[in-house]
Amino acid sequence: MTKPPTRTTASLAAPDLSRRKLCAVAALAVATGVYSPGALAHGTRAGDLTIDHPYATPTPDGARTGAVYFRTLINRGKAADRLVGARTERAESAEIHRSVMEGDLMRMRAVDGIDIPPGAELKLRHAGDIHLMLLGLRSPLRDGQRFSLWLRFERAGEHEVTVWVQTPRDAPAHRH
Ligand SMILES: [Cu+2]
């Protein structure tokens, strides 16, 4: 298991603390059976937002794109926020994509953001219609890897999360 790079800036000290707290909550959820055994979870707090279990599906050798999903994006605040961008060292760029039906064809469209209304619990999983697309992948995403991703929110600002590369039990990976 690769440890994500340690950041030492003062501004990140606090979120780190809450991350540890969140992991404890997740561990408790596992213990109480909210999550199925073995389905370990992780997450990050960013102000009023909780970024719950960012994950990516493994990619074949030579693939130029990858997709990142989230179990949930939760807004416990009273103000709306919006995910407006992402970046990672694993890829040249990242876009927010939405799948839309065009006649009989499913196509991806880049969108400029995802609204997260107050009280929202958005499920952005691999079976859904929204994902973060990694473009210009620098190396294949391998099962079991962890990598850093920076998410940019209109209100909460920029936050680092750790993406887990894993094969979903229930569905095939995203295809472009
Ligand atoms: Cu896509």
Image: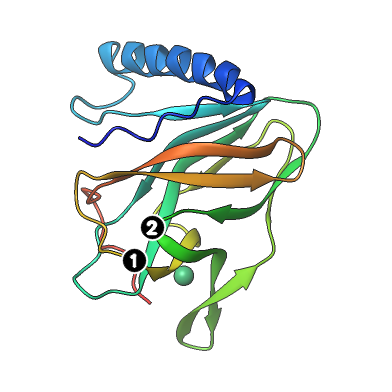
What's the mark number on residue 63? Answer: none
Q: Helix, strand, or loop for circle 1? A: loop
Q: Helix, strand, or loop for circle 2? A: loop
Of residues 35 and 59, which is closer to you in this image? Answer: 59
Give the residue pinned by disc 2: 90
- Residue drawn at (35%, 35%), measured in percent from left and top? 4
Please identify the quarter of the rendering in which residue 65 is found.
bottom left
Quarter occupied by the C terminus: bottom left
Q: Amino acid at mark 2?
A: Arg
Vertical arrangement, residue 137 with respect to residue 51, above or below: below
Please identify the quarter of the rendering in which residue 60 is found.
bottom left
Image x and y of residue 172, in percent: 25, 62
Crowd class of label 1 (few under 14; some 14 to 19; many from 20; radius 10 Å): some
- Residue drawn at (22%, 51%), measured in percent from left and top? 167
Q: Residue furthest front?
A: 8
Callout 1 touching callout 2 (CB < 8 Å) = yes
Vertical arrangement, residue 22 with respect to residue 156, above or below: above
Give the residue pinned by disc 1: 138
- Residue drawn at (51%, 65%), measured in percent from left and top? 93
Image x and y of residue 162, in percent: 41, 38
Vertical arrangement, residue 98 with respect to residue 58, above or below: below
Image x and y of residue 74, in percent: 59, 33
Give whichever of discs 1 and 2 has the lower sequence position: 2
Crowd class of label 2 (few under 14; some 14 to 19; many from 20; radius 10 Å): some
